[in-house]
Each structure stands twice: as structure tokens, then as C-alpha cells.
Image: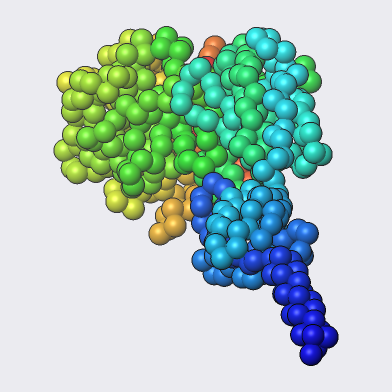
Amino acid sequence: MKNKYNLILLLSLIFLVNCSEDTTGFIGEGTITGRVVESNSFDPIENAKISLSPSNNTVFSDVDGYFIISGVEAGDYSVSATKEGYLTSFEPATVTTDLEVNVIFEMDEETALNRAPSTPILITPTDGIEDQELSVELIWSSSDPEGDTIEYRLEIKNDVNNDIIAMENIIDTTYVISDLKYGVKYFWQIAASDDINPEVLSSVSTFKTKVDPDNRYLYVQKNTNNNSVIYSANYNDATSLQEDTIELTASDQNSWRPRKNQAANLIAFLRTSNNETHLFTMNQNGSNVFQVTSDVPIAGTNLNELDFSWSSNGDQLLYPNYDKLFIINKDGSGLQQIYQTVDGSYISECDWSSDGTMIALKTNDLDGYNVSIFTIDLEGTILTTVLSGVNGAAGGLNLSVDKKLLLYTYDVSEFESSSNRQLDTRIFVYEFDTAVATDISILKDSGTLDLDPRFSPNEAEVIFVNTSNDGISSKSIYKMDINSINTNNNRIELFQNAIMPDWE
């Protein structure tokens, strides 16, 4: 009996020992919760992979960025969050039995550690250099620490107006800028961008173009957008070549009929503004454009044939508006009507004598015909009738400096049509003392027209336009000696595809 009691006691002790060992070896469990967001915006990141180390448990964040990992044994862990396009983020977590630990991941984009390009260095032209051509090569340098592709933005300003030249998406570190203005100081700056970081700006560098060559000729050309653009140029008689050509007006605007005044050192011209034609002025290099007229535009039957005139001292401008004639100061003040036709005919051209006492006018009807060319004084009294009572088109008025001569054109064919086509337009010089008009287009090719004549500065020559009478051929500007109209090769071509000449 005693042995049986001892056996039972031994078995009980073994059972107690085993139970004690099992209780001592048990490890409790806890829970890890958290959220994954973007580091800057704190917007949730969906489908980020959340991993535990060393257990390798893995879950994914939901649409709101939240995640939960249950049944994690108590202990210390490293929790990681990974997703394509973001830098992997790590957070420590200590799990305690039956408790919840919360982990927040603020993930940066992969480019967060990317460095911006170096500040661009402006190399050419040298800062502050002068006497540059109207076409300048700009050179700069920059590099990217990670070798990312750099795109550059170029911005150029000037010291005469608020115009800005801006070019974007430049890949090379060189750029040629053309069609600059004479005598203008330009300010240029480069911005570099790797499309990851904010763009990096260079310092501002300056250069100045060479002095205006004081071109003597002005003319108009049509561009591919069918806009009229005003140019100035010189002509080298020795080489028979056009030189120093400058585009004075913007190619995206319609500008025509340039008239230079030496006293004012300005060029007046016509431009479309708010569906009206107005007088503008600009410097010889095309800068400082100023609208002179506002309340009363220049107007008539054919805008391409309308003409105006400076006063000799450059203080005022004379221009037509249908049947009325106006004077206005060059600054836009002092507008006054000085004449109106008695028969309601339209004034399409005018020219003002050098001494300011006589005005030459050309009038016509609504169709551009029933032409009259005559002179008046400033009180509106008719002084001389040069041409009237004829059929056909006429125009191109220009008085000589001494008021003894008047240039004009007339279509001697007397042809009239709804399209205003001319067939045989010639240049005439009218002498007031003798009342005789002399044809100086006697060497003009048959089937062509001589148009828009102007005296040369010394009045020994005439500049004009010649073109075929078919109405579609190109036009060229010529000059000829008034005293050698019978001489072969007297007619010299100056500029091709050009109209509306002025020579000062």
C-alpha cells in the first residue's frame, strides 16, 4: 500500500513539473496597425507593401492607406513600407502582448533625393559687351548631378519697351537669336530644369547691338501670313546689292505706308487697330511705337492707296478721312479739320509742301475713279488743278521741296473696272510754272505699271514701284534719273518683292 501511494505521488510531481514548464515558455501576441501617406501632401497611398522583419509577415495598405497586422508575437520589429515610385520607408515597432501598436509611414517620391541642375553660367556674349550684330549666338553651361536631361528656358528683355522674347524646351546650351533691333540693350537669363526639381535661374547678362546704320530707304513686304511688314535698308550703287536690311515692324501685325521725317527722326506709318486704320510713329530702329490718331482714323475707299504727310518740321501729320482732311500733332493732340471736299468726293492722298503753305490732294469717287489732282492753301482755297475730268486711275502725289514740281501717276489707258485694275500707269512730273506734265516712264516695259513715285533726297532721281498689269505678279522697287529718262539702263532695280517706297 505504501508503494502504491509513492507511485501516485511521483506521477503527480511529474505532472506538476511539466505543467509549470509549459506555462513558463508561452509568448503572447499583439497587433500592429498604421497608415501610409505621402510625405508632402499626406494623401493616402494605396497598395503599399508592409513587411515585418524578422518575421516576414506582409500585408498591403487599403484605399485610404490603412493596414493591420494581427497575431504578431511580442517583441521588437522593423516595419518597412515599399511601393513603386516611392523611397522605401522603415519604422521600428515594439509589440506587447494583447496590445496594439500604431505605425505611420510618410513616404517620399523616388526623386526626393534628386538634386537640381547647377546654376547656369552665361558664357557668350560677354556681360556688358556692345556693338553686337542683329543676330547673336547665346552660349551657357550647366550640369546635372544625376545626369538627368536638362531643359532650358531663355528670356530676353530690352531697354526700349516691354517686349519679351521667350523660348522654352531648349536642349542645347546654345541658341541663336535673330531680328534684333539696332542700338538696343538686351537683358538675357537662362532657367535650367531637370523636370524634377524647381528650375534654377542664372544671373542676368546684358549686351547691346550696334548703332543704327541710318538706312535711307523704307519699303513694305508681304509675309507668309499676308501681313504687311515695314523694312529699312541701304542700297550699294557700287555693288548693286541691298544692305543693312532691318525688319522694323512685327510680322504678326499689319503695318504699311512708311513715311520718314528727318526733323522728328521718326517714321510714321499706318497700322490696323481695333478694325480701324490709324497713324503710328516709331524710331528708326522700330522701337517706341506710338499710336497718334484715336478718335478719327485714316479712312477712304482703298486702304492700300491711302497716304498722309508730315509737316516739314516733324511736329504735325496731315491725313484724310473720307471727304475730310485733318491735321494732328505727332503726340496725338491738337486734332483739327482743315478741309472738306465740296462735292463729297473722297480724299485718298495728300502731300504737304516744305514751307507748309500748300497741300496737294487726290480725290476720287466711291469706286476709285473720277479722279482729281489739285493743290489748296491752308484755308482750303484751290490753287492749281493738275488733273481732272479724265477716266482711269491716278495717284502717287509728291511735291518737290521748292513747290515747283509735283510727281503723280496716271493710267493713260483710261481703263476702268470694278477691280480697279490698271493697264498702262505712268509717272508724270507736273511743272507749276508752265502747267506742263512730262511723262518720265517712256522706257517702261509694255504691259507694266509705274506706281508710288517719290523724289530722292536731292530730287534728281525718283524711286517707284514697277509691276505687271496682270494684278498678280510680284512688285519691285526701282529708281531712275529724272534728267536721263531717255537713257538706256536708267531704270535700276533696288528691292524685289517690295512696295510703298520712301527715300529720305
Q: Residue at x 64, y 30 (%)?
A: 200
Would residue 121 appear left or right of 435 to someone viewing this image?
right
Q: Is residue 74 above or below residue 357?
A: below
Residue 116 or 172: which is nearer the viewer? 116
Q: Is residue 385 above or below residue 78?
A: above
Would residue 502 appear left or right of 418 to someone viewing this image?
right
Q: Residue furthest front?
A: 1
Q: Is residue 467 visible?
A: no
Residue 362 or 212: which is nearer the viewer? 212
Q: Residue at x 78, y 59 (%)?
A: 54
Q: Residue at x 46, y 33 (%)?
A: 257
Q: Is residue 116 visible?
A: yes
Q: Residue 371: give x, y in percent of width and height.
A: 34, 42
What is the image's colouring?
A: rainbow
Q: Residue 160: give x, y in percent of width and height.
A: 48, 19
Residue 322 or 341: which is nearer the viewer? 322
Q: Residue 70: give x, y in percent of width and height.
A: 61, 70
Q: Residue at x 61, y 37 (%)?
A: 198
Q: Residue 418: give x, y in percent of width and height.
A: 40, 59
Q: How many marks?
A: 0
User: In the rendered view of the protein, which quadrant contains the N terminus?
Assistant: bottom right
Would residue 250 appear left or right of 276 to someone viewing this image?
right
